[in-house]
Every structure is written in structure tokens, then in C-alpha cells.
Image (cartoon, rainbow, N blue to C red):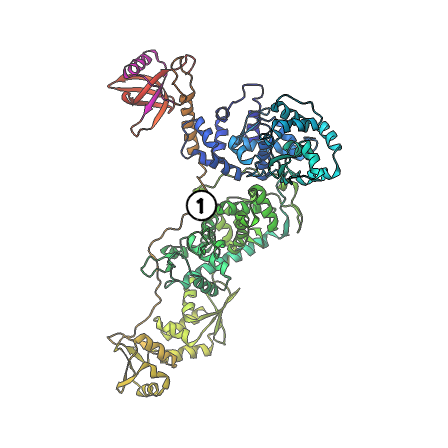
Amino acid sequence: MTPEERSRKEAAGTGAAAPRSLAESLRARDDASLSALLRARPDLITPVPTDLTQLATRAATRASVVRALERLDRFALQTAEALAVAPDPAPYGALLGLMAGDGGAEADPVVAEALPRALATLREQALAWGPDDRLRLVRTARELLAPSPQHPSPTGLGPTVAEATSGMSPGRIQEIVTATGLPSTHDTVSAVASLTTLFTDRARMAALLATAPAESLEVLTRLVWGPPYGQVTADPAPRLRWLLDRGLLLPTAPGTVVLPREVALHLRSGRAHRHAEPLPPALTTAATHRPQMVDATAAGQAYTALATVEELLKDWDEGGPSVLRAGGLSVRDLKRTAVALDVPEPVAAFWVELAYAAGLLASDGEADERYAATPAYDEWLELPAAERWSRLATVWLAATRTPGLVGGRDAKDRALSALGPGLDRSSAPEVRHRVLTLLAGLPEGASPTPDSILARLRWERPLRGGQPAADDLRGRLAEWTLSEAELLGVTGRGALSAHGRALLGEGPEHAPAAEPVGPGDKLPVHHRHHPPALREPLTAAEREAAASRAARLLAPLLPEPLDHVLLQADLTAVAPGPLERPLADMLDVLADVESKGGATVYRFTPASVRRALDAGRSASDLHAFLAAHSRTPVPQPLTYLIDDVARRHGHLRVGAASAYVRCDDDTVLNEILADKRSASLRLRRLAPTVLAAGADPATLLEGLRALGFAPAAESAEGDVLITRVHAHRTGPRTAPEPVPDGPPVPDATLLTAALRAIRAGDLATTTPRKPGAAPAADGDLPRTTSAETLATVQAAVLTGTALWIGYVNAEGTASQRVIAPLRVEGGFVTAYDHTADEVRTYPLHRVTGVAELADDQL
């Protein structure tokens, strides 16, 4: 049953016994309607209410009502605002008049068509209740939305005549009555009622205003759409005096006047809002591309995303930047990371935060705390490329950490740093999902303008009254979502890709039929109607299935890793695409990356070749590696370079004395001693083939390499020390958990159990008792002596009747229950518990009292 159908069912109560309270209205609902309420407002079920009265009380609390109002779309909120200024209770016709104007459905048929849906939303969320002839807004919502000097209404309306004249002297009220041509009365109440009747009578008000000076009408025009308050002097001008004498402006404080609500509604032709917005803004297309082009572009960006994350963590492989004392990266380290990745700083912050959210990097927890890759990173690297991407995209979609905030300030004016505290925004996942859902609703290949996306989101979740646009967090989240989705490869050229659609749990069968739309075009009419209710959040199994399907769609679009490079005569190698991991790892050691793009260019230098030799490779190993992986002949200059560096590599040996240098060729040592640049090493000859140094071995190695030599370190036994890259890893770490945006939406199992408990508790509290058996006050437990309790229970066993009991469990929690006793023995009563729908045993000493139910109950 849809919300509109449930609303019509409730409205059908007209003529029958109308509910007298919200609790009675909830009691008349079926389980489907209550389930919809608890899904829309999950805070009502935390913890589970004992009965429907407690559920109604909780639904009317200020915090819960504020949260519910913030999640209404603009038209539903406008409907609630109209109910707040309508009479209490209000007939449906009065509400329609406030929304569409005096002409009702004829004046604005679009509003008239959309109003039942908005009213059904308010009823479903327990913000409004009652049949169509007695509509009521929950009192807390009325207090929040009704006009007051401290909190002006978004409608721009002021107080009613009765409210504005509450502190006025009776004599002054009678003067106003006389000035308007009404007969004088003997009391203030009837005088105010007479004025109200006049101001709500369209014909009589038109006649009164027809006699008004033009200057006075101009004053009313300035106040009619709000704010309704104005300032006057002690001696008002004639145009103001004419209005004050007739009550068209009423004083509220010294020097302040207000336009009464009834007068404003007359001038507005009955409308509560200047512009009712029954339909969401249409999305405007910026461009339309072929779906194949969108998918290919998104796949290319997805591959770049994987390469960027790998490059980031490879750069931090031996230990990344230090962790600030307050947590996070320093501004300097973020700049260095941005330079290393060749991206702007905000983009670098996004990649760092994404890797952190995915659990691929964390702080190592050492005394000198640094960031490093986690063991999960090595596991992630072993996955196929498409699965690695789906892991990142799934994490991004659900993460509450918001990289766009990096560089800003928090509420205490502290800088927000990447990987630091204060970046969680619980609404981020919902906004990301909603933006992508809007993109999924467009024809394939269509990309909307960002402004139309923002306008749609602001219609679905309006800003609070008076809230500046700079505080529009949802708007900023939406803008960041569009840019991050493009960086990650979820979208291509601004349109949602096929694998991005699969990530949402959508399939091709859910996509609307493609219709020709061009840049600047509005989408077809069926795209402008209010969207259906948001889908239930995906379960863990559904998310995993969606990620798997997205990976399968993306895999054919990603380039296959290559097992070869193209060697050039200028000591470079060109990788025309992504390389297989062993080949890429070896090239990273043997050569330096010179440029990136569609193809990666590596350059061989003496230093890079020496790096490979230091890692334990021999010259023959390097020649064989290049010959096996080059599609072109190995250039002679590269062969000479490797042989030349290898011939000199290890010719000098450095050990610890503080340090020493030994070489079989004493002429080389003579050359070193003669070089003035070696003075800082404090060298002296110990033997024809040995020099001693005052520097440590590492400094000596670097110093000799700076002089153009290729020394090798050796151990105490005289063996060459092979230096290999040490991959620093943190201990096992778990990825950061998203911060929930309030209580989670209950699943079907929890809803079923909660409704059963609420219904059972309500049965216990509302089942009629026999005369004289009711408690002294509503909600009190029945009280009887132990003897009376035992006698009544024993009699119920013999007669098979049901009883109402008060019970206090071992934790001291009191409850009311309806039971059918089956037997009594040993101080215990075994009974069928109607509230729990099962047989239970209760100690009699914990039963506070019993009462018999009315004869026609159970």
C-alpha cells in the first residue's frame, strides 16, 4: 500500500470516531503503516517503545520532530508550514486554499494534484494526523513552524488578530471595531472575533481596502510577503495612522507594528507561500555522449586511479610522513605528496583519504609514529585490477570522511588536516548515493549541469530558514561527489558509467529508455515528476554483489598488462601501456620514470644501474632481463652503460674503521687522495691498498659516489653487502568505520520484532478492565495483596479467563502484561502471555497485582 493509499484510508475516518490524539491515530494504523513510520524515523525505535502511547510521545519530542522536518522535501515542508498557520484542526479545503490560493484546485491544479502526496508524507511520518475534516499538525512541529517574533515563519506570515491583540487594552480594541464600521461589543473576545470575521471575509475586506489611500496600500504591499513587522514613530504618518485605526496594522511593542495573518492572506489571495514548489526542479543536460565513450573514459580514469594509489603507497613503502601530534598530515607533507603524484593538493588529499578509508595505509604506532602501508595493501595488490577498483569505489561510496574539508577550519577554528580528526560528516554517504542515483535516472550518456543537481538536492532537503548558502554542507558534498566520481572513474565526461550504475545495485533493466536530449535541454516530463521513495539501503550481501558486478563490467574495459617495453637508443625505455607487476617492479629499480601518460618513459642512468647492482643484480642478469622484455634490440649505448657501471661497481670496498677504503689498484686510491673534494672525508693511507676515513661508512659511500666512483659496501668478512629495498608495513589495522547519520534504518527482522513488542505492550495497557479494577492513574501498575493475587490467579486457572498483571523483573524493570494462567504451583504461575505470544512462568512475588479484564476482551 502506497503512502497516498494509507493516507486516504486514514482520511476515510471522517464521520466515524475521529482519533483524539496522535497515539489513537497510530493505534488505528496497520503494521505496514507503522513499519513505514519506523523506517522513515528510525530514532523512534531506539530503544523499542513499550507501547503506542510511548511511541507517540517519542514522535512528538523536539529532537525527533526537528530531525523529521529536516528530511522533508520542499513541498512537504511547505505543506507542514501551511498547516502551522492554519486553524487547529483544519479541514482539507482550508489547507488546499493555503497552498493553491482562493481558487483551490482551479487556481493551481499542479499544487492540487501534488498536495495529497505531501499530506500522505506528513501522515506517514507522524507529523500530521486526523481525518481530512480535522487535520492536525503535531504540536511540537506547530511550535517550530508557526510564526513568532523570535522565529519568523518561512511563509512570511505574522500572528493572527487574536494573538496580536492579546495585550491590547479593551478600549483600543473597541476603537478599532468602530473605525472598521463594525457594531461595538461588550467584551474583548467578541470584538476580536468580529474583527477576525471581517478580515477573513473576502468581499468585505475588498470593500474596506477600496477606501484605503494609495500610500497605505503601498505600505501593505511592502509587508505582505514578509517580514510582516515594521517600525513606526510615536506620531505615525497619515498613511500609517489610517491602517492602525482600522487594525490592518497592530502594535506588538513600542515602535513596532505587525501585519495580521488574516490581512496578509487576503492580500495574497489566500496563499501561504509566494511560490509553491510541488515538483522538483528538472535536471538540465550539459552534454550527451555515446554510452560507449562514457564507459571507456570512466575505465581510463579508473586505471589512473589505481596507478595513483599504488604510486602513493610505493612512495611511502619505507615509511611515509610523520604523524602530527594532533593527528594527520602536516601541510608540508601534503604538498610533497601532491608534487610526487603531480596533482593539486586537494586531489592529493582525496587519494590519501581514500587509501586510508580502504585500510591500505595507517599510522605504524611506533614511538616515532609515521604513516605506512598496511598488510591489507599487499593483499589488495594481488587482486585483479577491476576488483581493486571496486574495493576503492565501494569504500568511497560509504565513507563518512570528507577530503574536501581539508585545509578548512573546524568549529574551534582549528585547521583540518588530511588523515586528521574532524573530517567525518555523517551525511556524506547519503549525498553521494543520491547524486549518483540522480545520474542513474538520466538517459545513458547524459551529463547534467552541476547547478541543476544542486537545485534538485536543495528541493529534496531544503536549507533551514535563514541559513546562509555558505553553510550548505549538502551542496558542497554534492559538488565534491561529482568531482570525486570523475577522478575515481565512476563517471566519465560527467555521465554515470555502466560499472558505476552497477555499483549502485542498478542494472540495465532499471535504466530509463534513452531519449534524445541535447545540451541545455530539460529532461522529459517523466523525469520531472517527484521521484519514487528512496530505495532501502543495500545489505552487506547486496553491496558485495553490486561490487562484483561492477568489477565484471569494468574488467573488459581496462588495458591488459604488457610483458614488454620498447628500448630506445637515447637510454630510454617506453612502456606503451600498463606493465605486468614483476616487470614494472624491476624497471622501477633499474631506471627512473621520466614522464607518464598514455605511455610511460623510463630513463637509464649510471645511478639507476648502480641501484640495480646494489640490489644484488649482476650485469649479466640485467642484460638478460632487457633482452627478454624488449620488443626492440637492446641499444649498444645501454649495453655499454651497464657494463661500464658494473666494471667499476665494487672495485672500491668500504668497511667500518670508523670506515675504510680498500682497492687492489693503488693508483685509484692515489687519485682519491689527490682530489681536493675528498678532504671532508678525512682520508689517510694505512697500506698501499687501504685508506682509513674519519667519516662513517654510509657518508663515505655517498662521498665517493659524488666523486664519480662506484664503491660497494662490504661486511666484516669482506663480502659485498647487497642492499635491498625494505618495505615497511604497519601492524594489522582495520579500516576506519563510517560515522552513522543517526540510528540505522531497521531491517525487516527488527521491524517485525519491534512491532510485535509494541502491539503487545499496547494490548496490555489498553485492554479494558472490569469496573473497579483499573489502576488509580493511567500507566500505574495494578496493586493487590499477595493473598488477593494468588486467589485471583487460581480462579483464573479454573475459569480459563485472562488477567491483567503488573510485573517487575529481576533488573527492576516494570511492565504490564495480559496473561491466561495455566497452572499455579511452588510460588510460580505458568501462563500464556498475550503480550509476548508465548508460554512463560512468572514468580508470584514479582507480580505487583492483578485485575480481571472486561468480559468481552480476549
Out of 498 and 156, give the one closest to the viewer: 156
Query: Residue 807 magenta-drawn?
Result: yes
Residue at the disc numbered 1: 544
Residue bounds of the magenta highlight: 780-808
> Residue 490 in the image: x percent, y percent?
52, 52
Q: Residues within 10 Å of mark 1 (few under 14, many from 20)?
A: some
The image quadrant where one finds the N terminus is top right
Q: Is residue 479 visible?
A: yes
Query: Quadrant of the rendered structure where residue 246 is?
Result: top right
Query: Residue 165 magenta-drawn?
Result: no
Q: Is residue 617 above or below residue 144?
A: below
Circle 1: element type: helix
Q: Residue at x 53, y 58 (%)?
A: 300
Query: Quadrant of the rendered structure where residue 465 is?
Result: top right
Left or right: 598, with 739 as reference point: right
> Residue 315 in the image: x percent, y percent?
41, 64
Q: How many marks?
A: 1
> Residue 735 in the image: x percent, y percent?
39, 51
The image quadrant where one finds the C terminus is top left
Q: Is residue 617 above or below residue 159?
A: below
Left or right: 382, with 460 as reference point: left
**Label 1 is placed on what type of residue?**
Glu
Out of 788 and 562, give the one closest to the viewer: 788
Q: Is residue 515 above or below residue 166?
A: below
